[in-house]
Amino acid sequence: MVSGGEIVAAAIERHGVAALYTLCGGHISPILVEAKRRGIRVIDVRDEATAVFAADAYARLTGTPGVAVVTAGPGVTNTITAIKNAQLAQSPLVLLGGAAATLLQGRGALQDIDQLRILESAVKWSTEVRRLRDLEEAVEQALVKALEGVPGPTFVECPVDVLYPEVTVREWYGKATERSRSGVGAKMRSWYVERHLKRLFASGERNFSVDHAPALHVDDGDVRRSWELLGAASRPVMLVGSQAMLRPAAVAELAAAVKALGVPVYCSGMARGLLGATHPLLTRHARRQAFKEADLVLLAGVPMDFRLDYGSQISPKATLISVNRSRDDVDRNRRPTQAVVSDPSLFLERLAGYKQGHWDGWSAQLRARDRQRDEEIRQQSEAESEYVNHLYLLRCLDEHLPDDSVLVLDGGDFAASASYVVAPRGPLRFLDPGVYGTLGVGGGFALGASTVRPDTETWIIYGDGSAAFSIAEFDTFVRHGLPVIALVGNDGAWTQIARGQIEMLGDDVGTTLRRTDYHKVAQGYGAAGLKVESAEEVEAAIVKAQRLAKSGKPVLINALIDPGEFRAGSMSI
């Protein structure tokens, strides 16, 4: 009989999963060993949350569910924030968690807790496995359900005695019963254990069918009606969001459709970079103003949450078309003129099949506004600074960024400034937490991106607050030969919080940090560390970091910056 570890490894291999992310634990060792034996790359990290963040990034960039494998108890609970982040970002991944032996659960075994109940609100589907014959179906269901409908994380609890070979498990239980070798109680205990083992390893047909959701569908009537509304507009604007990127294999078709429609477009979240950095339809600045002026707004995979002021950013007089896979999100907070429950990318491809629109004058107006804002940023970047002007630092990075680079944003003030200044060069080259606003994604997202695209230059743009969450993963980068580059904007504070807190409450308590030598921390893990203290050092440090990364070495640039007032008044609730 094959072991549970072999069954799990075979299932994820069939689904095309090329790598899994883990932090070792005795409960889950068989999965790791069998995955390695099958040629699946096993990447071990320094924090379980990182394993999930990496699986999340793997899923976003490939369209295949990411897989994270963690041990029981604290191994599972350490993933909660990362799992919730993936759920809210609609990212398909599978969490495989170890568990106490089936016969010992509820009796005070090591790391034995009710894991399913804890994860219930953070996953779209979960199950526990009690017999070896049920393990394959559970993993298959988890992989399929992660992708269906509105994607998200799933969870399978895998007890230790389901994963290890039967002979090993029988030895464990045998040793336990040998402690009382005589008497009626010992005989009853042996009988009970043997009965349990027979059930645990009972042979039988493992034939099963995995329920699949209906294929993604686009209604012809929705397409026609939307085109009629669009054709009547004189100032349309489109916002493409992360949900439109859930079909990575079809991203070229999506980009072609957006271009063919001819509508000025903003891209948010994972959709940043969809049209490259300089396409004439791409608009990056003053979105709020454009939404107030537009007579039609098309939301493609974007809910009307706090990022759109719960829908109030859009003029009440404007025609509103909302396209979303989620029935809950398509009209949340505001009823659209046309609500379309469908995959946004498929819908836009169908919509582009109609005749192209012409809104050249409106597009030119928005582009002129963009140029004006870019010039304002350029001027601000040249202002005198005690340390390094953070806008100048980001502009210099943008000028040196290769076309095949991947950007990972992890932070508050500095990372958010980067979204204004540093432009992704193409689709699927930008990763940020998403709506949950989670700090700490940097190490894991970069790890996942580097796994998927090992020949690509991967940058983490860290705030100094967020850097500490995952800086230990420089050890992981070094051990696994992943030459990630991190740029830390070090202003010695949680600036996004400090700015508003001081203004409103008059106190900086809890928001101050040291200008820590993060480059030395990276050096301690075996990476290269560079320190930048003046504008004159910026370009040389970026070029050196790129050269070191090309040689296979991870690098961290610790740039001492002045925060400035670029994002004053940007607090969100």
Image (tube, helix red, strand yellow):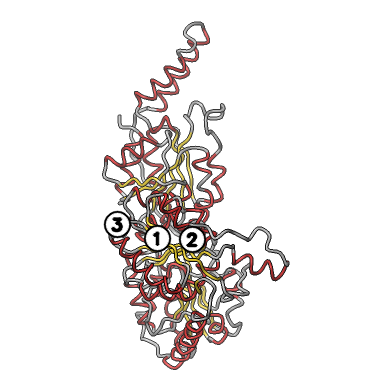
- Secondary-structure class at tag 1: helix
In the picture of the structure, the residue carrying the numbered disc 3 is 552
> Does residue 465 appear left or right of residue 151 in this picture?
right
Q: Amino acid at mark 2?
A: Ala
For the residues labelled 2 and 1, say whether their Cβ atoms are less than 8 Å apart.
yes
Q: Amino acid at mark 3?
A: Gly
Residue at 36 percent across and 62 percent down: it is 458
Please state the horizontal and vertical placement of residue 170, each as a whole percent of the image: 39, 21
72 versus 165 height, above or below: below
The foreground one among 277 and 84 is 277
Residue at 46 percent across and 19 percent down: it is 193
Please state the horizontal and vertical placement of residue 356, each as a whole percent of the image: 37, 86
- Secondary-structure class at tag 2: loop
Look at discs 3 and 2 and give the one toward the viewer. Answer: 3
> Which comes sooner in the sequence, label 3 or label 2?
2
In the picture of the structure, the residue carrying the numbered disc 1 is 60
CA gap, disc 3 and disc 2: 31 Å
CA gap, disc 3 and disc 1: 25 Å
Disc 3 packing (10 Å; few <14; some 14–19; many ≥20):
some
| Res. 89 mark | 2
Disc 1 packing (10 Å; few <14; some 14–19; many ≥20):
many
CA gap, disc 2 and disc 1: 10 Å
The foreground one among 251 and 25 is 25
541 versus 7 height, above or below: below
